[in-house]
Amino acid sequence: MRRIVAAGLVLVLMSTLTGRVAPAQGVTASPAESMGPPPAATEDGSETAAELALSEPTWSVIRPPRSPAAREDHTWTVDGEGRFAYLFGGRDGAQTFADLWRFDLETDTWKKLSPPGQGPGARSGHSAVWLEGHGLIIFAGQRGTDFFGDLWSYDPAQGSWTKLPAGGSPPKARYGSCMIVGPDRRLWISHGFTFAGRFDDTRAYNLRTGRWTSIAPDGRRPGARCLHECFTTTDGQLVLFGGQDADDPALGDLWKMRDDGGWRQVVEPRPQARRLYALAETSGQAWIFGGSGQDDSRLDDLWRVDRETLRSERVRLAGLSPPARDAATLIADLVRGRLLLFGGQDGKARSDLWQLIGGPTPAVGVEATGEPVGSAPEPSPEG
């Protein structure tokens, strides 16, 4: 039976924005890749708290003066210090984007970036992570009938993109995959889709050598799928949830990669089946919002999954709430103790921005109007 969280309970947000994970048993991290990034720090250089508590969490709308165009299937990724979040790509109907935006988490303002030189082409359905020393890393995606299998990094210090080499055994081009920083500090990708079919492979990329390696084990594994997400357990192991396969428009199975590299299906209470949901990690939890269910209806529920036990519980919230949607992005802002939701689609692409934060008083620049659920107007897009 699922445990229900009342709105008055305390939500503990413990961040993984630092990207620090402990190597799992049986996995050896090379010296050059075993060191995680430093803890998140404030402007004066002091470390942020390892744990933030939110009482009476509520959604409210943020209306920046400028915003990216409405979109779905984009990525939005927080940097290692928890100061900025970088949005890349996505689509609105037939229009696919290659723009890069930086969101200032302190001022709640957007800035469109224009890196010189070559960068990744317009795409949607790609994957992204932040890795200290490399910056924003994106993988794969789709534009029209074209699928990508390339890997790019954006270094904010240099302000430029770099295409990473693809040696070894690279994955085939795909859309709707997922990517994490693995327990060995390599990039791990898993599953995905092209018009030729769906994949059930898992591969790792070594940034030191520029080589891909297949780590898909023999035996039982999550079936071929796409439009899922991945997160990590507290000891850094890969977890995969939901998505879509050739038979079911939405899946509800949860899988964990074992210490020996094999997969194990986890039988625990969990969110209902869904695809194209938004996911954010904090140090103790994975947070899941929305998506589309088996009847193709869009969802507006919020769940948290304990990253140690993999048990889930629904977060019950009163008042203003984001309209049901899929293909949105959710991020965790450790310093200000909140979750942020941007974009997605509910029949049309959206560019609205929401925050989940504790207490009845909104943060500076946030408008809590008491509007009926779903009536928040769209910000005026630019760029």
Image: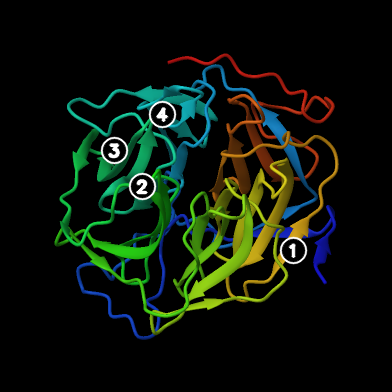
Residues under labels 2 and 1: Cα distance? Answer: 32 Å
Amino acid at the residue labelled 3 = Pro
Give the image location of residue 139, x and y in percent.
33, 47
Q: Residues within 10 Å of mark 2 (few under 14, many from 20)?
A: many
Discs 2/4, front: 2
Q: Of marks 1 and 4, which one's residue comes earlier in the chain?
A: 4
Figure coloring: rainbow
Tell whether 186 sits left or right of 317. left
In the image shown, does 211 or 296 lie closer to the viewer? 296
Residues under labels 3 and 1: Cα distance? Answer: 37 Å
The residue that label 1 is drawn on is: 313
Amino acid at the residue labelled 2 = Arg
Q: Residue at x 73, y 33 (%)?
A: 323
The residue that label 4 is drawn on is: 101
Residues under labels 2 and 3: Cα distance? Answer: 26 Å
In the image shown, does 39 or 293 lie closer to the viewer? 293
Residues under labels 4 and 3: Cα distance? Answer: 12 Å
The residue that label 2 is drawn on is: 174
Q: Of marks 3 and 1, which one's residue comes earlier in the chain?
A: 3
Q: Residues within 10 Å of mark 4 (few under 14, many from 20)?
A: many
Can residue 145 be seen here? The reply is yes
Q: What secondary structure is marked by label 1?
A: strand
Give the image location of residue 247, x and y in percent.
59, 55
Q: What secondary structure is marked by label 4?
A: strand
Q: Of marks 2 and 3, which one's residue comes earlier in the chain?
A: 3
